[in-house]
Image (cartoon, rainbow, N blue to C red):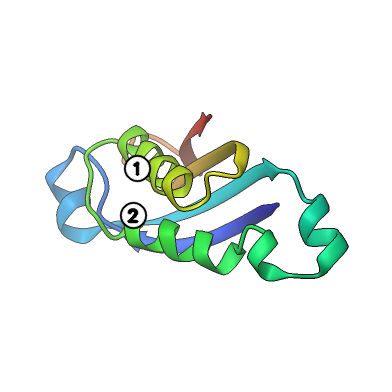
């Protein structure tokens, strides 16, 4: 299951301006779990609810952090707690227009479990 291109205006970064003004972020999430029960029964209770995953990502993106690594870690930990049936998960956080001394479309971190 994947959720790609989630967009948020958040306040992550080490610089004062990033924490004050924020920046645009894109988040991609993917996970693997045994889908057979959900597929055979057509029952959401047997699946990983992607709207609940979105809400987790949204909640964690709302908590300011200095490091994107910290945000990615918190997202994965919250997902792991909410959906123990997930075998593997990964999240990539893209900071659009990072504050560097030159043209740069984005910076990103990826974390998996």
Q: Going 57% across and 49% down the picture, which residue do you hit?
A: 28
What is the residue that sits farthest to the right in this orientation? Answer: 40
Label 2 neighbour load within 10 Å: few <14, some 14-19, many 20+: some
How far across and down, in percent of the image, does residue 86 sit?
60, 42
Whether 8 is drawn above or below 72: the answer is: below
Return the residue nearer the eye: 98 or 14. Answer: 14
Return the residue nearer the eye: 102 or 55. Answer: 55
Return the residue nearer the eye: 111 or 22. Answer: 111
Quarter location, residue 107: top left
Whether 8 is drawn above or below 87: the answer is: below
Which numbered marker is on residue 74? 1
The answer to whether 98 appears left or right of 113 in the picture is: left
Which numbered marker is on residue 59? none
The answer to whether 64 appears left or right of 81 in the picture is: left
Q: Going 29% across and 60% down the picture, which residue do you hit?
A: 62
Quarter location, residue 57: bottom left
How far across and down, in percent of the image, does residue 30 sit?
63, 45
The answer to whether 64 appears left or right of 36 in the picture is: left
Label 2–label 1 contact, CB within 8 A: yes
Q: Going 63% across and 55% down the picture, which residue do you hit?
A: 4
Which numbered marker is on residue 60? 2
């Amino acid at each position: 299951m994947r959720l790609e291109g989630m967009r948020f205006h958040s306040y992550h970064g080490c610089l004062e301006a990033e924490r004050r003004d924020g920046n645009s972020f894109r988040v991609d999430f993917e996970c693997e779990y045994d889908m057979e029960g959900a597929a055979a029964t057509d029952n959401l209770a047997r699946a990983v609810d992607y709207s609940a995953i979105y809400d987790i990502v949204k909640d964690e993106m709302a908590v300011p952090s200095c490091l994107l690594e910290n945000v990615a870690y918190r997202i994965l930990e919250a997902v792991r707690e909410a959906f123990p049936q997930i075998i593997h998960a990964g999240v990539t956080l893209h900071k659009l227009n990072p504050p560097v001394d030159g043209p740069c479309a984005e910076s990103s971190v990826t974390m998996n479990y």
